[in-house]
Amino acid sequence: MIDILKKATYLNRNEPCRRGSTLMLPEHGKLIVSGDIHGNRANYDCIVKCADLANNPDTHIIFQEIIHGGPEDEFGGCLSFELVAQSAELKIQFPDQVHFILGNHDTSVILGTDVLKNGKEMNRALFAAIDRKFKDNSNAATLALKQFLFSQALAARTHTGILIAHSLPADMYIDNFDAAVLDRDLQINDIIRPNSAYLMTWGRRHSQEVLTQLGEMLSAELFILGHQRQEQGFSKAGDNLLILASDHSNGVFLKIDLATKYTVDELIECIDRLACMY
Ligand SMILES: [Mn+2]
């Protein structure tokens, strides 16, 4: 696992389409966008199967927040690092087609800070499971995991004006946000509260006024985000915002054409349910 994570880290950092911390997706082909995965192996497998990357070299997948959740070891430890390693293997197999964007749970792993999911502090459960599995090698495994997570991009853009990210700065922090963070390589400091990559991965409940302002600031006509819980798997959360979730039985994914322009309502027509595909 350690070698796989290191190789995938190198590939993330050296993606040919990467400009600073943003991935510039190609003008043609298909794009599959996943919402948060949170250790949901069935949903992850379904997305990979639907993408059929080997037979569709113009198809791309964007994953986000694979960590925290899903299967546990016998002591309640979180095994989601195994799914991260599996996705790293997929990156090695299809380096130009598999892409990752940074989530707030990733930043909490990198920094070792507490983060709650359904009332449980997830990092304690994750690091304990890594310790049990890797024993003397657990420091190296944890470091490789953190470096992989930190090598992810902050956002991806299509030529048709869509910006895909885990989240966006919340209304009250909009004046603290420096959009230039997308144009340069991330430093650890960027993901520490209240700096700009932190704001971009933790924000919630955006007003239309701020979404419009962010659209101008980031030159984005539409945003596709994860991060906020969606009982129905997705929601139109603004005139220019679609939120996706792929971490439960109502989870969805999105499949769009990279050369086509969409409205949010047209994007919604491109959503597929994950559960019906197992
Ligand atoms: Mn999140």
Image: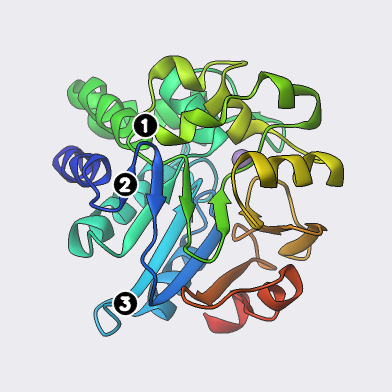
Q: Is residue 34 shown left or right of residue 59?
A: right
Would you say residue 207 is visible in this rendering? Answer: no
Residue 188 picture quarter: top left
Amino acid under disc 2: Arg
Residue shown at the point (45%, 32%) measured from the top left: 126
Amino acid under disc 1: Phe
Residue 1 picture quarter: top left
Tell me which label, 1 or 2, sits earlier in the chain. Answer: 2
Above or below, 101 against 243 in this view is above
Q: Estimate the x, y position of residue 118 in percent, counting from the top left.
A: 71, 38
Front disc: 1 or 2: 2
* Residue at numbered disc 1: 150
Amino acid under disc 3: Asp
Above or below, 10 against 33 in this view is above
Q: Nearer the viewer, residue 104 or 126?
A: 104
* Residue at numbered disc 2: 18
* Residue at numbered disc 3: 58
